[in-house]
Image: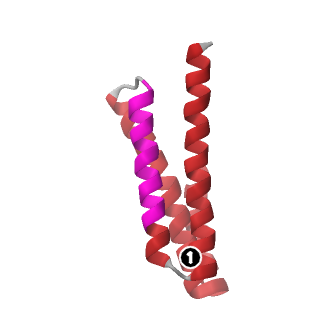
Amino acid sequence: FDAFSRLAMSFGTHQLLFALAHFCMGYLQIQEGAHLASWSVVCIMSCVSAMMMHVDFSLTRSEQLVETLLVFTGLISGTVSVHLWSLEGVKAQERISSFLPVAYFA
């Protein structure tokens, strides 16, 4: 039970970090217009999530690389999409549609 609870708490913490990052994307970038603050929060949450994954799980070097790439790629592509939407609105829809599949995949 100890291993299962540790795994569940770790994934729950990762989901909390992702939820905070997505909340800051929507609130800070779209509603408040604070782009730098939103990018900073997303970068911090990505780094904390990747660091926790490296510490909590026993992964090979290639698995750590894939995990880190997926964490950063998903959040950064989502942030770029929100950034384009907050600056250009509907006019950026074609460029946003190229970033969203990457965010959904990661």
Residue name at image x 39 percent, y 33 percent: 54
Label 1 sits on residue? 29
Magenta includes 5?
Answer: no
Mostly what secondary structure, the magenta segment? helix
Colour basis: secondary structure
From this viewpoint, is residue 85 visible? no
Quadrant of residue 26 in the image? bottom right
Is the residue 29 above or below the residue 8 in the image?
below
Is the residue 45 above or below the residue 5 in the image?
below
Is the residue 12 above or below the residue 80 in the image?
above
From this viewpoint, is residue 9 visible? yes
Looking at the rendered image, the quarter that the N terminus falls into is top right
Which is nearer the eye, 74 or 99? 74
In percent of width and height, residue 94 lies at: 61, 77
Magenta residue span: 40-57
Residue name at image x 56 percent, y 70 percent: 81
In percent of width and height, residue 3 lies at: 56, 16
Residue name at image x 42 percent, y 56 percent: 44
Magenta includes 44?
Answer: yes
